[in-house]
Amino acid sequence: DTGVSQDPRHKITKRGQNVTFRCDPISEHNRLYWYRQTLGQGPEFLTYFQNEAQLEKSRLLSDRFSAERPKGSFSTLEIQRTEQGDSAMYLCASSSLKRATDTQYFGPGTRLTVL
Amino acid sequence: AQSVTQLDSQVPVFEEAPVELRCNYSSSVSVYLFWYVQYPNQGLQLLLKYLSGSTLVKGINGFEAEFNKSQTSFHLRKPSVHISDTAEYFCAVDRGSTLGRLYFGRGTQLTVWP
């Protein structure tokens, strides 16, 4: 396994701009998760996919946020009209349903700074 | 709903000393429990997990944790720390039915001094 990868690692944007992040899970992992981590806090769940289906969304995922996983492989997280409060580390994780005791493996994260 | 409390936000220790990082959770259902470590500017790495069976769980890098159902705790321990253990440690719970979303504590910054 090559691990979960995320792109970009860092993103600086101006308030009001749209941004998109990409996550590539571990090969053949059918579950994919997005979390947000702000300074001094633990990660907070945003949403997750099983294959291409988005099964759960947190209340943190406002209308400005949208996530997709069109072919059940990589996923994108888009934030429209960014606000300063969106500044955070966005973490992606993946896991497999094939093994009942599998766990979530995290990527390195995308750090977003909104000026 | 679950909540996870990490009682100490910062734990400073000297090298080769023992350490315990505390974690308590609240849940009305059975849970799965995890400890993750995060080094600066990196993602989270799994240290260990409790799913069922023996309440003493051994993980990587010499860490271990004990699940105590009556006290709803899952404290992380290491008998002798190294400077390289300096990092942020997160306790997390899963509601235990479908291995879905994780609920994380706020983290404990472990700093090991020479």
Image (cartoon, coloured by chain):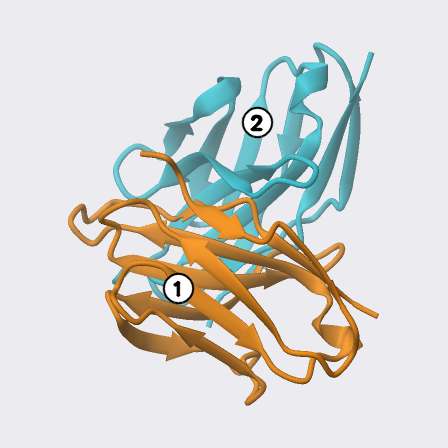
Q: Residue at point 31% right, 34% down?
A: A1
Is A17 drawn above or below residue A75 in the view shown?
Answer: below
Left or right, residue A102 beside residue A17: left
Label 2: state its secondary structure: strand
Residue B110: percent from left, percent from top: 72, 32
Q: Does the CB distance between marks 1 and 2 fall below 8 Å?
A: no
Q: Residue at point 64% right, 36% down?
A: B21
Chain A color in figure = orange
Is B3 drawn above or below residue A5 in the view shown?
Answer: below
Chain B color in figure = cyan
Between the residue at mark 1 and the residue at mark 2, the CA separation in whole angstroms equals 36 Å
**Which quarter of the image is occupied by the C terminus of chain A?**
bottom right
The amino acid marked with disc number 2 is: Arg
How many numbered tags mark residues here?
A: 2
Q: Which residue is mark 2?
A: B77
Whether residue B26 can be seen here: no
Read off the chain for label 1.
Answer: A
Left or right, residue A70 beside residue B108: left
Q: Nearer the viewer, residue B17 or A84?
A: A84
Residue B97: percent from left, percent from top: 26, 62
Q: Residue furthest bottom?
A: A63
| 1 or 2: mark nearer the eye | 1
Q: Nearer the viewer, residue A105 or B91?
A: A105
Whether residue A102 can be seen here: yes
Q: Label 2: how many residues lie within 10 Å, few (<14), some (14-19) or many (20+)?
A: some
Mark number, residue A40: none
The amino acid marked with disc number 1 is: Ser
Q: Which residue is mark 1?
A: A75
Quarter of the image holding residue B15? Answer: top right
Residue A40: percent from left, percent from top: 75, 54
